[in-house]
Amino acid sequence: MRGDAVDVGGGGRAGRRAAVKGNWKKWLLAGLMFGAPAAQAATVWEPRLRLTAEERFDDDLRLGGGGAGQLMTKVTPRLGLEAKDARLTLDSFYAADLLMRHGSGRTTLDHRGGLEARHQMTRRLRLDTAIRVFRVTDPSSLPRDGLARSTLPTFFTQATLGVTNRLAERLDVRTGYRFEAVRIIDVGQRAGYAHTPSIEGWYRATRRLSLGLEYRYQGFLYEGALSQSHGAALGLRYRLTRPTTFTVRAGPVRYLAPVGQQGGWVPRVNVELQREGEMLDVGVSMGHDLVGANGFTNALWADYASVMLARRFTQKFTLFGAASFFRNGQAPSLDWAVFRGAPRVSQGYAVSGGVEYRIDRRLSAQGAVDRIAQVGLADSASAVDLTRNVFAVRLVVTPW
């Protein structure tokens, strides 16, 4: 038996070389397998920097000059930090907007910041969060229409937190919380708050179709007065194509007004169409709902609609555009059916379009035109025309 295992002379050396030559691949594979968890656990951090220089013409009535308009220069350094590993994706930024208004000579410094993170805690459990903070004097920097009606500094923050649990192969349950706060920074102005916890479940009936059910609570707080709402909604999500998804939610909302005000039922409807592709992005959203945290009053009913389009013709040339419309008034439905001549209904629209040309990997140029209009105040008996037109050219530098 032992003699069978012994090689004589040079044949033994050749056999050992063959054995070593064959085994090194096994040792390398074993090393990669043992090293894989450490490699996957390493988090890659990447800092980002973007500088934007903008020259614009703005005829906003709130800037003074009788609405004749004036030139403005806007310089924005934007610092970002991204992190990614096998379970975590994080994107954060801080931007400072230096606004120099040539007509009035006024210079202001606005601040914006945000963070988005998604953490896959286990195979079935996922945590996601997003935070945005604004302290701005330029109303066009705010993410919601109708928040600012003057050039006074406005503070706005929005935070969301959600946990998604895959209870079964086809069933996902998500619990979430959303917080919003708005305050016009001026003497006598109070902050408005909106707290929105919710729970929803989505069942994947087919590869394309998902059905959902949601309960949502809203708490609106302004000047010490609390109003609340309880709502239930059915949902449908259908994947039309690989990059295109259609989603609709609808259901009743019971509004509980503060003492001395009228409550009632409000219908809630939301329709969305989202497409994210290599050459074309499209977003459509419309609906009717209760909203709060606007800095002027408590809860409002709101009609809204928006369309967003981005078309990449080449790697260097992109055309983009957007349009939005809103109406709102005192909850639950004061003057909702009055479309003209209702001074306590605020309404407005925004239309924008532009082009981007990427000169190289780090440098791009943009041109944009915006028209923003807001007529009527939901908390006043007067109507003010806040229409503005903005023409802007930008140079964007991304060093890293």
Image (cartoon, helix red, strand yellow):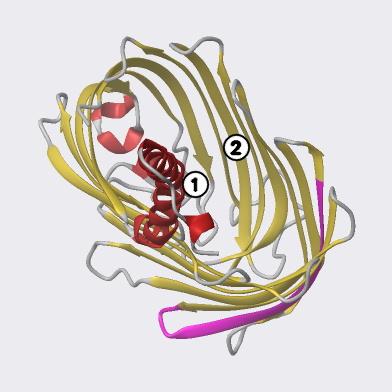
Q: Answer few, some or many: residues within 10 Å of disc 1's Cα (few below 14, many 20 plus, some between 14 and 19).
A: many
Instruction: Name the residue rendered at 43%, 39% in the picture.
Output: 18
Can you tell which mark lies on residue 226? none
Reply yes or no: does residue 92 show up in magenta: no
Q: Position of residue 386 (x, y in %)?
A: 44, 38
Which of 68/253 is in front? 253
Can residue 237 be seen here? The reply is yes
**SS at circle 2:** strand
In the picture of the structure, the residue carrying the numbered disc 2 is 324
Reply above or below: 193 against 360. Answer: below
Boundaries of the magenta span: 222-238
Instruction: Name the residue rendered at 51%, 62% in the picture.
Output: 379
Q: Position of residue 127 (x, y in %)?
A: 51, 69
Reply yes or no: does residue 229 show up in magenta: yes
**SS at circle 1:** loop
Q: Position of residue 125 (x, y in %)?
A: 58, 72
Say left or right for 207 vs 42. right
Say left or right for 222 vs 188. right
In the picture of the structure, the residue carrying the numbered disc 1 is 145
